[in-house]
Image (spheres, grey):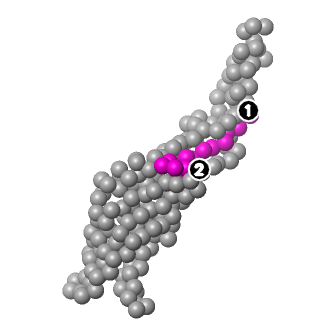
Amino acid sequence: MKKILPALLYSLTFLIGGEISVSISEDLVNEYLNLIGNYQIMTGKKGDQATWTINNPRVKFQYGKAVFLTTILFKKGKTDIKKDIKRNIDVEYNSNKNTLKLVITDSLIKMERRGNVLGKIDLGSIYQSGLIFPGPKPSIDSFKLKTKRGRVKIRISTRKSYVYFEKDVIRFALDLEYE
């Protein structure tokens, strides 16, 4: 009886399930953005090119949201435009690949003067590839347990996923169920 009770309690914790999570820190993402540094790109046809300079890209993780911040300078001919950018960040989870992707929402930036669009640049195409992280899903979807009644196969399934935006961190969690 003394050996059965701890084994039963241990088995019940697996059968009830729980939450497993991955945290992505603000410092980690900003380290990646600092590695890229200020980014400059030329667009347009030769002789009529525009220079885009993306300065000081960074993220800020707060309770309830995450934001991407930068300053963009646009130069074309005699036109110089400086624009401070603030865009929200969403989290996409791919359960098949078990990956988390931080997505800059509304990432297409337009530079305008007097209602005319002088140029466009997509921040997602520049930064998105490095904002993919491994997810929390266990590498197995079932396991076998030897009991007095024989072998029992226990399956692991996901009930629900959650994204928590906290100060300095984004936490992605899966609510697992053992059956």
Q: Amino acid at mark 1?
A: Ile
Image quarter for residue 13? top right
Left or right position of 122 against 92: left
- Quarter-of-image position of residue 12: top right
The residue singled out by tag 2 in the image is: 164
Badge 2 element: strand
Q: Which residue is mark 1?
A: 16
Q: CA distance from mark 1 to mark 2?
A: 22 Å
The circle on residue 45 is: none
Instruction: Give SS at disc 1.
Output: helix
Q: Amino acid at mark 2?
A: Tyr
Task: Point out the image quarter for the N terminus.
Answer: top right
Q: Is residue 24 visible?
A: yes
Query: Is residue 173 highlighted in magenta?
Result: yes
The reply, left or right, for residue 171 in relation to residue 107 is right
* Residue lying farthest to the left in this orientation: 47
Residue displayed at 31% across by 74% down: 73
Q: Which residues are magenta?
A: 165-179
Residue 41 on image: x %, y %: 28, 71
Going by the image, does 52 lie left or right of 61? left
At x 70%, y 34%, the residue is: 17
Q: Along the horizontal axis of the image, is 31 left or right of 89? A: left
- Kindly indicate the quadrant of the structure image that contains residue 125: bottom left
Residue 167: x, y in percent? Answer: 52, 50
Check disc 1: other Cα within 10 Å, few if <14, some if 14-19, many if 20+: few
